Image (cartoon, coloured by chain):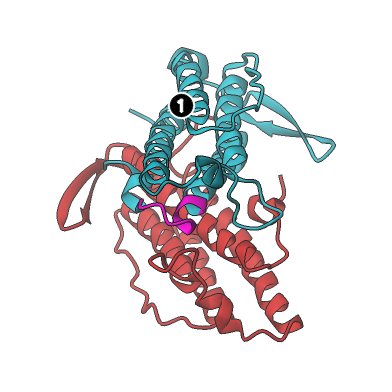
Chain colours: A cyan, B red
């Protein structure tokens, strides 16, 4: 079976979002066990001018839902970006996964040459579907997923590479 | 043109390694401008039990060369892991890119169902080529590339998301 646009997008996002959910679960439990206000983690950043954990999770889910929708030629779902607690972030991840799971191979496959237009820093950028996926959406998605992990690791949450990679 | 194993691997790695090289260049210039010993950055970590910058760069390049070689059915090049300076890390990135560029589509395409056997935490794991690429090699590669970025951002190097993403 040859590699398809579906295989290179939807299951990659849902798999990594499951890992992100598990990591957030461990962070929440860690906060509870140490009697640390969960908002300390939610608002933690790797640098003063980087986004906090909440926004990293919002951005990872935005990147995944945006990519899925655009490859499918569907409307990108709009979320309110109001999450400030672990349960709210979990709900956002869950609704993103549910949306992605609604996009079957019949909607995604064949999108290699679909024109994807993004507004990036005020100008329109045109991608082919496959360049959008491989050069923009996946690198961007992983950026936010890994940075969320890094923020929690930096703040002492006991997670490891295996939590990020998921089971092989 | 349908998505190919080549398109989803080699150009993704080489593109991201070019960004990593540019980021390392900025870090080196930053160290020089501020008269900070470059080894401060080379040895910086996000957590005491995470790998330092040098090892993140080694791991990102390992992940890329390992994936390219395994998909091509070629021997994985062995590097010595002795890099302790920015020029040495740059040389490692450059030789990885050169190796990847030697792997043309004719060697990578059609590797979707090639059996890839990895030793992970002491046990053998079997992947199909496409599962290896999408579920293991790319997530692992981005993990190290993003963590390298995060270490430098955390330590005040003036880089931004755009340096990571490269030009769209």
Residue B64, compared with residue A148, is above or below; it is below
Mark 1, residue position? A10
Q: Determine whether the residue tagged by mark 1 lies in a helix, strand or loop.
A: helix
Residue A108, compared with residue A34, is above or below; it is above
Q: Position of residue B65 (x, y in %)?
A: 40, 61
Q: Position of residue A15 (x, y in %)?
A: 38, 33
Q: Is residue A114 left or right of residue B46?
A: right
Q: Residue at x 76, y 81 (%)?
A: B33
Q: Is residue A138 left or right of residue B99?
A: right
Quadrant hosting residue A6: top left
Front in this rendered view, residue A34 or B65: A34
Residue A39, compared with residue A159, is above or below; it is above
Other residues around mark 1 within 10 Å, as few (<14) / some (14–19) / many (≥20) = many
Quarter of the figure with the C terminus of chain B: top right
Q: Position of residue A168 (x, y in %)?
A: 26, 42
Q: Residue at x 16, y 51 (%)?
A: B124
Q: Residue at x 32, y 38 (%)?
A: B131
Front in this rendered view, residue B159 or A112: B159
Could you tell me if residue B106 is visible in this image? no
User: Where are the magenta residues, as a range?
Assistant: A151-159
Q: Residue at x 25, y 42 (%)?
A: B127
Asked if residue B50 is among those painted magenta in the image, a careful observer would answer no
Marked residue chain, label 1: A
């Amino acid at each position: 079976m040859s590699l398809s646009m579906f295989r290179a997008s939807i299951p990659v996002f849902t798999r990594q979002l499951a890992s992100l959910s598990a990591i957030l679960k461990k962070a929440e439990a860690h906060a509870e066990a140490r009697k640390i206000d969960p908002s300390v983690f939610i608002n933690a950043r790797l640098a003063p001018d980087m986004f906090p954990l909440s926004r990293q999770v919002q951005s990872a889910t935005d990147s995944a839902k945006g990519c899925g929708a655009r490859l499918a030629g569907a409307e990108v779902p709009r979320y309110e970006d109001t999450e400030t607690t672990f349960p709210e972030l979990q709900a956002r991840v869950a609704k993103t996964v549910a949306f992605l799971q609604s996009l079957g191979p019949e909607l995604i496959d064949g999108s290699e040459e679909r024109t994807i237009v993004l507004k990036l820093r005020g100008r329109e950028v045109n991608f082919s579907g496959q360049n959008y996926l491989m050069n923009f959406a996946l690198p961007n998605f992983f950026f936010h997923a890994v940075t969320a992990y890094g923020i929690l690791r930096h703040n002492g949450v006991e997670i490891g590479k295996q939590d990020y990679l998921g089971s092989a």
